Image (cartoon, rainbow, N blue to C red):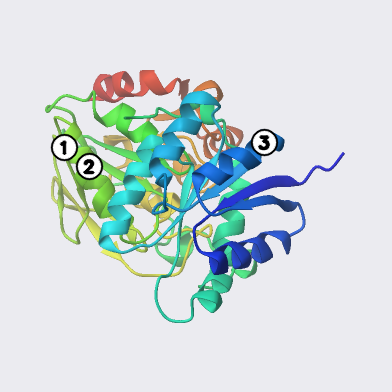
Amino acid sequence: MSTNIKVLVVDDSAVVRQVLSEVLNGHAGIEVIAVAADPIFAQEKMKKQWPDVIVLDVEMPRMDGITFLRKIMAERPTPVVICSSISQKGSETAMQALAAGAVGVVPKPGIGNRRMALEDAGSDLIRAVKTAAHANVRNLKVSSGAPAAMMPKLSADAILPATNQAMAQTTERIVAIGTSTGGTQALEAVLTVLPRVSPGIVIVQHMPEKFTASFAARLDTLCQIEVREAQNGDRVMPGRALIAPGGRHMLLKRNGSQYHVEVVDGPVVNRHRPSVDVLFRSVAKFAGRNALGVIMTGMGDDGARGLKEMHDAGAPTVAQDEATCVVYGMPKEAVKLGGVDRIVSLQAIPAEIMKYA
């Protein structure tokens, strides 16, 4: 029997369907078993053979992609990757898709030479499909450049040198959170139950550029605390959560007893920008035992080394358990390195935050 990841592509553009199929079929281990011009046709194809992963457009005739996504997640949860534009309007739509249960979002250019642009974005699509194939979508909380394989896997040294000494302890405590696949739903589950008196929070969620602003704005409407996309110089303060902007690294800095963030450009670290390792290293350096480190659901190992550095600097550390992760990658690697003090369920993370506070 074939062990290939079986993919269904749903897009109303014949050109896009053709190019996405060529990109995916050109990668060993992935097989496009069917294409469909809209969700109605897709449902007929799925009756014959159910895919492992669905690559889904949003704006389509007869049934839009988000309605179809909600239908799939309600009837037979299946990993879905949204292939959508990254315009401001598109990013808001993509956030709705992530809230509805999509595992990931791949930007789809809408101008210029579309075929060339889609081929250039092939590595992002392949990575997203492979990640989605490993996702435990039943754990999703559903509400109504150069190819990565060719990139050098840089460490946090590329942004901030390591240090063995953290600043002195203060009374102001902060929380640093890192997450990736499944993290949009997991962060919503955590942040929406925190009270206004919660400590200041800094977050890296792996997400494309322009998507983090919509994500933060959506969470801000749902939470008691203030949630916003970080800007350079923003203060980290009680009752506020700052989310690193997509495409840029975020570091914690300290001025006296006050903390703020620095948002910087730089190379990808662990094939991500923003990188959890970069944030966690800066927290280890400038906060030490004044901070709580939390690593949550996600593919890969970004954040594992940084959490170990926080642990070694005296910070208590928490990892989400396998049973509640969509992808038990990042927490697993952090546990392997010995940087985790406690392993808890997603539902227990808010209590860990408030207990630390």
Which of the labelled discs sits on residue 221, or is there none? 1
Question: Measured from the top left, where is residue 84 in percent x and y?
Answer: 42, 58
Residue type, numbered disc 1: Thr
Mark positioned earlier in the residue sequence (2 or 3): 3
Q: Residue visible at 31% across and 28% down?
A: 190
Q: CA distance from mark 2 to mark 1?
A: 5 Å
**In front: label 2 or label 3:** 3
| Residue 240 makes an appearance in the image | no
Q: Residue visible at 40% across and 53% down?
A: 207
Residue type, numbered disc 2: Arg
Q: CA distance from mark 2 to mark 3?
A: 33 Å
Quickly name the residue at label 3.
Answer: 50
Q: CA distance from mark 1 to mark 3?
A: 37 Å
| In contact (CB < 8 Å): disc 2 and disc 1 | yes
> Crowding at label 1, few (<14), some or many (≥20) Cα neighbours within 10 Å?
few
Question: Measured from the top left, where is residue 76 in percent x and y?
Answer: 55, 27
Disc 2 is placed on an element classified as helix
The image shows residue 194, relative to residue 102, as above or below, that is: above
Judging depth in this view, the residue of 188 and 356 nearest the camera is: 188
Quickly name the residue at label 2.
Answer: 218
Disc 3 is placed on an element classified as loop
